[in-house]
């Protein structure tokens, strides 16, 4: 059974991402096809990339990088929960991704996003990043509009179709994550 990390990518105070990631994780816990873990980028307190060597060399010197690398290496697939800031992903998420290289390779990813346009532009940004890291991203994504899916722009109110989309996303991520395990063996 593969292990899927639900990566919460915003570290902003008062972030809506905690609600979204919690909802995703609660849905995941009802499934029996994989092991799911919630991984909050904020818990790692990563500074701006401060490793002296290229991540592709895998020679990490800083303890925070080693801890982050161990977490990502332990996962077989990812569901990124991301906000959309100015047509892109949060800087903290991009920074966390950029710390590593091989730990991401030959794994699968799906995306759950939120923002004024449902986070679609942040997902498009992430798809390009995933390609460079040799991560196979799945087609299905889930998007939450700030104006309609959050009560008063503050409280997440998922609709039944969001749960259906997420179920399809999980199906795709688990299938791809399982298939790609052979490449990592």
Image (cartoon, rainbow, N blue to C red):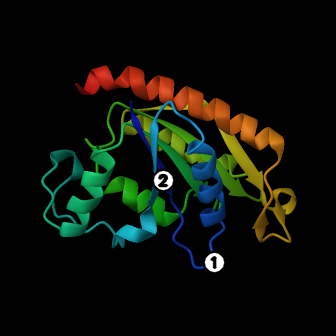
Residue named by callout 2? 7
**Is 171 left or right of 16, judged from the image as shown?**
left
The reply to whether residue 87 is visible in this rendering is no
Q: Earlier in the sequence, mark 1 or mark 2?
A: 2
Local crowd at mark 1 within 10 Å, few (<14), some, or many (≥20)? few
Instruction: Tell me which residue sits at (57%, 36%) in the image.
Output: 31
Q: Which mark is residue 65?
A: none
- Quarter holding the C terminus is top left
For the question of whether residue 154 can be seen, the reply is: yes
SS at circle 2: strand
Q: Nearer the viewer, residue 79 or 23?
A: 23
Count of marks, rendered view? 2
Residue drawn at (32%, 36%), measured in percent from left and top? 105
Picture coordinates of residue 28, whole percent (x, y): 57, 43
Q: Is 179 left or right of 174, judged from the image as shown?
A: left
Distance from label 1 to label 2 (Cα)? 17 Å
Categorize mark 2 by other alpha carbons within 10 Å: few (<14), some (14-19), many (20+): many
Hey, which quadrant is residue 151 in on the image? bottom right
Q: Looking at the picture, how far across and down is residue 120, in whole percent?
A: 69, 46
148 relative position to 182: left or right: right
Q: Which mark is residue 14?
A: 1
């Amino acid at each position: 059974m593969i292990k899927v990390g639900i990566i919460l990518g915003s570290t902003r105070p008062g972030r809506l991402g905690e609600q979204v990631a919690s909802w995703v994780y609660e849905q995941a816990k009802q499934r029996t096809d994989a092991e799911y873990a919630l991984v909050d980028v904020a818990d790692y307190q990563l500074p701006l990339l401060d490793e002296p060597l290229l991540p592709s060399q895998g020679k990490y010197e800083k303890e925070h990088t080693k801890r982050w690398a161990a977490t990502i290496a332990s996962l077989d697939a990812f569901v990124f929960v991301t906000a959309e800031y100015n047509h892109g992903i949060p800087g903290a998420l991009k920074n966390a991704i950029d710390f590593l290289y091989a730990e991401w390779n030959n794994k699968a990813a799906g995306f759950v996003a939120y923002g004024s346009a449902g986070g679609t532009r942040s997902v498009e940004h992430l798809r390009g990043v995933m390609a460079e890291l040799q991560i196979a991203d799945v087609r299905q994504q889930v998007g939450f509009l700030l104006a309609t899916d959050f009560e008063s722009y503050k409280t997440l109110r998922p609709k039944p179709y969001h749960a259906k989309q997420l179920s399809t996303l999980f199906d795709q991520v688990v299938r791809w994550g399982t298939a790609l395990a052979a490449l990592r063996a």
